[in-house]
Image (tube, helix red, strand yellow):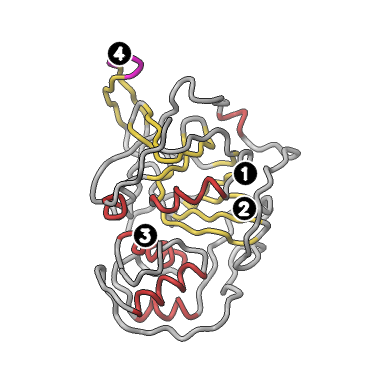
Amino acid sequence: MVARRLPRVAALLTAGLLAVTACGAQAGQGPEPSPAAMRLGPAAPAAPVAASGGLGAAAGRDTPSLTVPPVTAPRKTLRLGAEGKTVTWLQKRLTELGYRPGKADGQYGPTTLAAVWAFQKVNGIKPTSTIARRTWEALETPKTPRVLAPRGRETRAEVDLTRQILVLYVGGEVELISHISSGSGIPYCETATWQGSEQEFCGSATTPTGNYRTTWRVSGWHRSYLGELYNPIFFNGGIAFHGALSVPLHPASHGCVRLPMNVAEELPGKLGKGVPVHVRGRFRGA
């Protein structure tokens, strides 16, 4: 499938303002093993992915702080839409810590907001668009994400359904941390035109917990029977990591793991085929 150019409006939709995208594999797009075949075996090797620097070892379940230089935060209250040097400082600091706020352009928009949400969730702060005292303090002494698979491979992806975050480890160190939106848990039945005929598709809209591996992928937009996915990387049947124009704070997908569009642009270059994916937790609401 030919990739479409990302519309400018995509960044404005990251915070959940439009568009429901969904999961579902398209027949003939690539090999799609059964969920049982994808579950981890003890001797199965992980696909190599090149490391590009780390932010702290993944050993242990909770590490109190990252191995980054100490900083003094600006401590100026920021709200969505703010501009200036304080926003640039925020963006650079988030990037340094493994989050993906977009370009350090001094503009506090939805792409930076998604990174702020991820950071706040990792540091035990209720997600909000306002950057105030607690968030500035956490930026000075940040925590690492809680390790979900302490005996996992050094290169792996962990999906925390409770906190709604994705953490990618490369070489045993944190490489990338992102806000996500997983399956809503609401049963659905939807009618769609698929393979030339109108068909009904039903499911539970859940993101199952368990241990899996990345399988096939598509570059650019991929049409499934429930919607369109951007740069999907499948890891459990028709369930994939993928970019979406709507990534709200609550679980909202049909079962896939939605990512901000800028993260979905970067992830395929860092998450190879056959890499372990560990899905844990349960969303309990605000």
Q: Nearer the viewer, mark 3 or mark 2?
A: 3
Name the residue beneath numbered marker 3.
114
User: If the image is split into quadrants, where does the C terminus sit?
Assistant: bottom left
Residue at (49, 51) in percent of width and height: 266
Q: Are marks 1 and 2 in contact (CB under 8 Å)?
A: yes
Left or right: 11 with respect to 58? left
Give the alpha-carbon distance from disc 3 to disc 4, as whole Å.
38 Å
Name the residue beneath numbered marker 2.
149
Label annotation for residue 276? 1
Q: Are marks 3 and 4 in contact (CB under 8 Å)?
A: no
Amino acid, disc 4: Ser
Q: Earlier in the sequence, mark 4 or mark 1?
A: 4
Give the alpha-carbon distance from disc 1 to disc 3, as whole Å.
25 Å
Q: Secondary structure at mark 4?
A: strand
**Residue segment shown in magenta:** 194-198
Q: Residues within 10 Å of mark 3 (few under 14, many from 20)?
A: many
Can you give x and y, in whole percent of width and height, for residue 143 in the image?
52, 71
Label annotation for residue 28? none
